[in-house]
């Protein structure tokens, strides 16, 4: 079994890269990918430790894409097998990180205006190694009694449309895919069903548009994806020669109903051979591009 989608404490997961590998080893996984949100800071450490745990480590990243989606849907694109030393990738992710910190300052200012006592120093301490996100703000609010739970902190202050909500700077579809290609990675649409199109046909149209921009494939194995949706994706992948992938989207204690490898409700069991197929797809992609 393998798991090609998970988060460490470099973004919003609760475990560090080594703890992820320990967990993977105890579950008998043969390959895992680290796909933190908009950062690759955990990747070097992760790659270096793979051998110690006898697990194939796949370097990755998960990019939030700025695009219009129906029904509060969202688009995330995974870069798998990226080169973490690629300069364009590092520069772009650093830019996103800077913008994220500016946004955090705006959220703090807004909360202070609302008479909530919270400082940037507290927030930086809470985020530790990781990129600052709204969940960090929420945890502080709960600790200080400004909200009774993480969910309430979002519902009162931080969710879209609430008083302390601030937009995040994100890459567009073309820029996200290009950045991944430039870092010699495969661009894989994460959890396609969460784009929230009303019909599969609309999702299909969008996926074919992304293909024109260089999308290589999509996740087909993801907890909670309707079985019919999975079947439709498998058909589409055969039709256009898309690569397929999948994973649990493990976040450790930060999403405690999701298990590494098997996902939510143990509905996942991704076979080992997908890693080989993805590797082969990468070889082909960059061989034919001749770069
Ligand atoms: P950020 O990257 O700072 O925008 O934070 C995004 C994270 O916040 C997501 O991964 C979720 O874990 C969490 N989140 C976003 N919206 C909500 C919401 N309405 N309720 C609870 N958690 C949320
Ligand atoms: Zn996450
Ligand atoms: Fe995602
Ligand atoms: Fe994820």
Image (cartoon, rainbow, N blue to C red):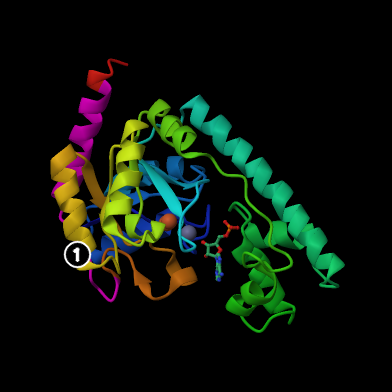
The answer, for residue 270, to whether it is visible in the render is no
Q: x and y percent of residue 145 in the render?
A: 73, 82
Q: x and y percent of residue 86 in the render?
A: 46, 27
Indicate if the residue with disc 1 has its beta carbon within 8 Å of ligand 3. Answer: no
Image label count? 1
Q: Nearer the viewer, residue 60 or 73?
A: 73
Secondary structure of residue under mark 1? helix
Mark 1 Cα-neighbour bin, 10 Å: few <14, some 14–19, many ≥20: few
48 above or below 120? above
Picture residue at 55% right of the left edge, 38% below the top: 93
**Which quadrant holds residue 158?**
bottom right
Picture residue at 63% right of the left edge, 62% below the top: 134
Picture residue at 71% right of the left edge, 74% below the top: 141
**Which quadrant holds residue 150?**
bottom right
Which part of the image, by quadrant, shows the C terminus?
top left
Which residue position is annotated with label 1? 228
Is 144 part of what is drawn in magenta? Answer: no
């Amino acid at each position: 079994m393998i798991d090609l989608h998970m988060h460490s404490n470099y973004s919003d997961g609760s475990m560090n890269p080594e703890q992820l590998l320990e967990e993977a080893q105890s579950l008998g996984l043969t390959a895992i990918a680290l796909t933190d949100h908009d950062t690759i800071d955990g990747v070097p450490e992760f790659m270096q430790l793979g051998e110690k745990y006898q697990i194939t480590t796949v370097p990755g990243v998960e990019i939030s894409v700025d695009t219009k989606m129906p029904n509060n849907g969202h688009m995330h694109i995974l870069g798998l097998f990226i080169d973490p030393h690629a300069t364009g990738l590092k520069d772009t992710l650093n830019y996103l990180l800077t913008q994220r910190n500016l946004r955090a300052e705006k959220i703090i200012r807004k909360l202070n205006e609302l008479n909530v006592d919270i400082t940037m120093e507290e927030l930086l301490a809470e985020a530790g190694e990781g990129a600052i996100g709204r969940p960090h703000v929420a945890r502080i609010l709960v600790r200080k009694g400004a909200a009774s739970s993480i969910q309430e902190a979002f519902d009162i202050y931080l969710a879209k449309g609430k008083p302390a909500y601030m937009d995040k700077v994100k890459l567009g579809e073309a820029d996200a895919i290009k950045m991944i290609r430039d870092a010699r990675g495969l661009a894989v649409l994460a959890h396609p069903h969460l784009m929230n199109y009303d019909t599969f046909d609309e999702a299909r149209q969008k996926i074919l548009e992304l293909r024109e921009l260089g999308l290589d494939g999509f996740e087909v194995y993801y907890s909670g994806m309707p079985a019919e949706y999975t079947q439709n994706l498998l058909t589409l992948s055969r039709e256009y020669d898309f690569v397929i992938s999948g994973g649990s989207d493990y976040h450790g204690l930060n999403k405690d109903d999701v298990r590494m490898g098997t996902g939510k409700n143990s509905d996942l069991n991704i076979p080992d051979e997908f890693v080989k197929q993805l590797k082969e797809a990468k070889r082909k992609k960059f061989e034919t591009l001749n770069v």
